[in-house]
Amino acid sequence: MSRTVPFYDFNKLHNPTFQEKINARFAEIVSKNGFVEGEYNFSFEEKFAKMQGAKHCLLLANGTDALEIALLAYGLKPGDRVAVTGITFYASGEAILNMGMIPVYVDVIPNSGLMCPKSLERVLEKYDIKAVMPVHIYGLPADMKTINELCQTRKIPVIEDAAQGQGGFIHSGPIGSGGNLVTFSFYPTKNLGAFGDAGAILTDDDDLALIIKTIRNHGRSELELMGRNSRCDHLQAAVLDLKLETIEEENKQRKQIAAWYHQALKDLPINLVDASYLETSSWHLYPVFLGDAGIRAKAQEAFKEAGIGCTPFYERSLNQEKVFNKFSEGEWTIASKMAGTVLCLPMNPFITEDDVAYVAENLKKVL
């Protein structure tokens, strides 16, 4: 093995300088015995809302809670139908089922996996949809301008699943600036990651912000709402607040790495994300659309031998997952064909141009 190119690189991300700073914060928190909703929670919420172009940021225990609480904040009830994109991590659909609601699948755009507005329009015409959940999959920004227009004319609320979207941009600015409820996951592998689970919802609406605050803290406010325990602990908030110091530079580097990949892979017989996304994606992941499960398996084996990290996203479209295949409303033709054929190449802020060339060279051998 001549070299290694890790998929993630936590050693460089959590370098000695970072460790020294975070250990000082942890020691401070322990000395004050302030473990829940402390000063770093409030600091992060203020900074992150401003960074993402929203009025309010509400930290939560995790990204799945963020989706569920967003559904509750919009007043949805068990039995309501929620339109959700067919290519996504199953937490998107899981949140719908956990709330007793019915997922209705919306097909995706080839070579991106993003919600297809034309499919959404057909789904909205055919079914009684109470909310729409587009996903900024792989970090690519969904067409929120068109999706919002389709939903606004029908007075249907939108929940943007931005678990992979921090660092990306839509028509109005950073993901989070479009006026919808926008949910984030800060799982450690995300562009902006905690040391465990954490999540957030962004909103511009004061009333929705109060509802979310109430729900996350056992319903404790003047509102008559049932709540839950979804507070983000102070230690995780301290990590996230510290990482805000470098996240913009790291996301900028991800865009550079994506540009290197595009240049190195453009002549290979595979499908890439359109170059128009080079500046707007968060590049949480760098997917290549191989179109064949067998080729993907060969590429995975070759990369393993070459010391290259890679991950297959996603093995199945949402409608193909065992828990979800009992629900049969919506469209999924392209999503089902795409599932099992996409491979994500190493993507972290510390990859070099030489690393990209090495990955491209090994992929070319397989093809």
Image (tube, helix red, strand yellow):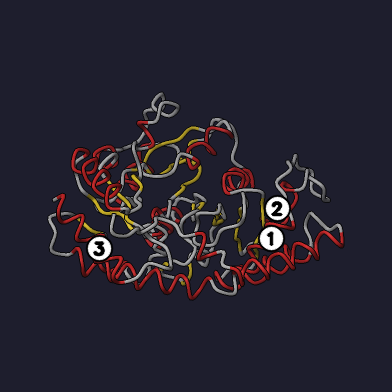
Residue carrying label 3: 358
Residue 366, how many percent across, how many down? 16, 49
Image depth: mark 3 or mark 2 in front: 3
Could you tell me how far apart the alpha carbons at marks 1 and 3 are, in whole angstroms?
A: 37 Å
Specify the amino acid type for callout 2: Cys
Q: Nearer the viewer, residue 6 or 220?
A: 6
Q: Secondary structure at mark 2?
A: loop
Badge 2: residue crowd in 10 Å (few <14, some 14–19, many ≥20): many
**In the displayed structure, does residue 257 sit left or right of residue 48?**
left
Badge 3: residue crowd in 10 Å (few <14, some 14–19, many ≥20): some
Residue 232, label in figure? 2
Q: Nearer the viewer, residue 101 or 273?
A: 273
Q: Nearer the viewer, residue 249 or 102?
A: 249
Residue 264, how many percent across, how many down? 20, 67
Specify the amino acid type for callout 1: Ala
Query: Dots 2 and 1: beta carbons under 8 Å?
Result: yes
The quarter of the image holding the N terminus is bottom left
Task: Place residue 235 in its image quadrant.
Answer: bottom right
Q: Secondary structure at mark 1?
A: helix
Residue 237, label in figure? 1
Vertical relation: 219 (above or below) 13 = above
Q: Can residue 235 be seen by looking at this rendering?
A: yes
